[in-house]
Image (tube, rainbow, N blue to C red):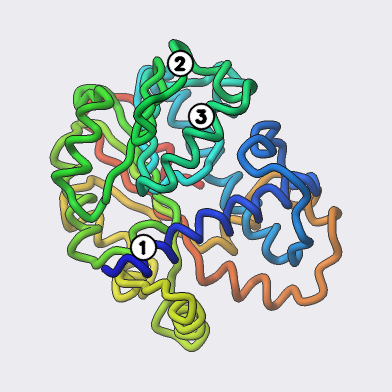
Amino acid sequence: MSDCTDAAIQATCNDASVCKKYAVDKGYWMDRFISYMVPGRIQRKQPEISRGYYARTNSIWLLLKRFLTRCSCTCQIVSLGAGLDTTYWRLGSENMLPIRYIEVDFLDVVVRKIRCISAKVPLHSCLSDFSTQDDESCLHCGSYHLVSADMRNLGELEEKLKQSGIDYSVPTLFLTECVLIYMSPEKSNAIIQWVAEKFSDAAFINYEQIHMNDTFGQVMISNLKARQCLLAGAEACTSLKAMEDRFINVGWHNAQCQDMWSTYNGLPDKRKIEQIEMLDEAELLQQLMEHYCLCVAIKESSDFGLESLLRF
């Protein structure tokens, strides 16, 4: 993958953070930390975009809290391609931190996030043993770890997780949001299989594009290609069943995939947030959400009840 493509992929971090900040400012959900990651006023976004991010953020949030509750927080969360995400701080504000929370991303993104954390007291005051960083490629503070790695290189990823103190003996949840699709299926499947082989009790939450082989999907691919974002893994994102099978085929005990339109309609605050902004084209929202999905896979050897994550 070329450097220009990597830079374009990293630019999607900005897009996502800005859209989340706008949605939070409008009241779609509460996140008092995102303004420290993304300061200033945000240009208006279409209601379809904000509702999409509401569905994405809140469905994952509910699953994370369910996982933490099942494990009594004696567990780990690994966020691959975390960007400027603020989930660690949100969980901390609710006294729901796991024993280890690891974020991984490209070096440039990690450097930017470390500088932001260092500059904002409300962010670094939540981290134990925080000190000014000489090495901006990583941050290790108590339960929080932020490291840089090219996730297409499984050996490098594994080494960075080891440096973060990863414990293969405790329940661990891996989270990817629009990450795997930027890798070839061979590379992403290697990560999925590695997790299944290394952990006896694990969950994997993957938010990603779906139905990439229909007309709408092809337009999405073309639009991203114009921005030098090549969806190298699009061929693995053809159907809900294909998304489930990629986990089952490499050792996960169970997997369930659901498009975001179905997920959105099942969220408890849906009617409330629909009062925030009027929506002109409901059909466009449905079509857009039907081209994103949430896939949850579990592998359980103990009795934590991780099967409950499959009901979303």
Q: Residue at x 42, y 41 (%)?
A: 110
Rendered location of residue 231, percent (x, y): 36, 72
Residue 29 lies left or right of residue 287; in this view the side is right
CA neighbours of label 1 inside 10 A, class few (<14), some (14 to 19), many (20+): some
CA neighbours of label 3 inside 10 A, class few (<14), some (14 to 19), many (20+): many
Q: Quadrant of residue 117?
A: top right
**Type of amino acid at the residue the image marks with label 1:** Asp
Rendered location of residue 277, percent (x, y): 84, 59
Q: Which residue is mark 2?
A: 131
Q: What is the C-alpha distance between the residues marked 1 and 3? A: 25 Å
Question: Which residue is more in the foreground, 7 or 172?
Answer: 7
Residue 274 lies left or right of residue 291; in this view the side is right
- For residue 111, the mark is none
Q: How many marks?
A: 3
Q: Between disc 2 and disc 1, whose residue precedes?
A: 1
Q: Secondary structure at mark 2?
A: loop
Question: Which residue is more in the foreground, 166 or 64?
Answer: 166
Q: Which residue is mark 1?
A: 6
Q: Which residue is mark 3?
A: 88
- In the rendered image, the residue lying farthest to the bottom is 215
Q: Identify whether 65 is placed above or below 141.
A: below
Rendered location of residue 87, percent (x, y): 54, 34
Q: Are marks 1 and 3 in contact (CB under 8 Å)?
A: no
Q: Between disc 1 and disc 3, whose residue precedes?
A: 1
**Type of amino acid at the residue the image marks with label 2:** Ser
